Amino acid sequence: MTLSTEIVLIWSAVMAYALSTVLFVVGTVFTGKRLLSAGLIVATVGFALQSASIAVRWGRVGHAPFLGFYEVVAAYAFATVATVVFLGWWRPQLRPLGAVLMPLTLLALGAAMLADKSDEIAGGTLASWWLTVHVLFAKLSYSAFIIAFALAVVYLLRDRPGAHRTDAILDKLPDQDVIDDLAYRAAALGLVFLSVMIAAGAIWANEAWGRYWGWDPIETWSLVTWLVYSIFLHLRLTMGWRGKRSAWVLVAALPVVAFSFAVVPVVYNSIHGAYLKGL
């Protein structure tokens, strides 16, 4: 397979995601069950197209999508759509979450499409199994945190003053107590995944650079993210923060995740950033 095949596939996925976004937003605003179903189907088609694009690139360059800004950010967009597709087919009443998650996907993938798409060959320490585990659990933690964020946003929208006039927009979703519990569970699962990511990254760092931890900017901000969600769990389990207060913490936590995963590697001079920028 050639680079042109990959580009055709990824642009086809972008167009499918754009159409899916429109269907999800319109379907949520006007409570159209058929539009939500259509949005999910189109998102699934886009997901399949991006999966094919990743497979083509993986086969050509010989590694998973973890080198260069294009690969990394596109992979996070891929993880977001995987979340939408999984939740939408698993629990149809959660399909309106696509109206929150798909626009984020378009923003991320749009940024990725503007970046350099040159092939980067992984060799030496980059071929480590621990790096694969590290990257995999980074994607899983991101997916869990963005689920928690989307659920928290839904909770706050339904809890705002005057929401009784627009309840029909989100009436297909579960009760508030269920949304609150699902958001908490998603955040807790994300923290577990993030812990595995940090541990696997430390083992790989020892293989690659001869030390487990060096306070590199990305290492430091991964720890900051871990502490933020640990504080959330402490507030939830020890201090009894639930409902609106819990949701606001989750909404405030996602920018920390976004900054840690997407901004720090680009802005700060770090070893990790060199890999993200394409060495």
Image (spheres, rainbow, N blue to C red):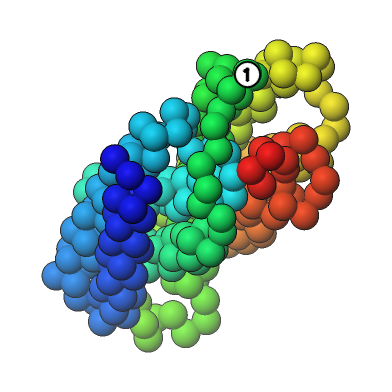
Name the quadrant containing residue 270. Answer: top right
Left or right, residue 269 beside residue 42? right
Q: Quadrant of residue 224?
A: top right
Q: Nearer the viewer, residue 40 or 95?
A: 40
- Residue to which mark 1 is pinned: 124
Horizontal and vertical percent for residue 276? 64, 43
Q: Position of residue 178 (x, y in %)?
A: 39, 51
The amino acid type, in three-letter code, at marker 1 is Gly
Give the x, y percent position of residue 142: 53, 44
Residue 190 can be seen in this image: no
Query: Could you tell me which quadrant the C terminus lies in?
Result: top right
Q: In the image, is residue 231 above or below residue 42?
A: above
Displayed quadrant of residue 278: top right
Packing grade of label 1 (10 A; few <14, some 14-19, many >=20) is: few
SS for tag 1?
A: helix
Q: Is residue 168 above or below residue 231?
A: below
Q: Is residue 90 found left or right of 261 in the rendered image?
A: left
Nearer to us in this view, 9 or 39: 9
Q: Is residue 74 visible?
A: yes
* Image quarter of the N terminus: top left
Asked if residue 273 lies left or right of residue 188, the reply is right
Which residue is depicted at the point 39% across and 40% down? Answer: 57
Residue drawn at x 34%, y 62% is 11
Q: Nearer the viewer, residue 246 or 102?
A: 102
Residue lying at the far left of the rendered structure: 34
Residue located 44% across and 28% down the image: 62
Residue 55 location, x and y as percent? 33, 37
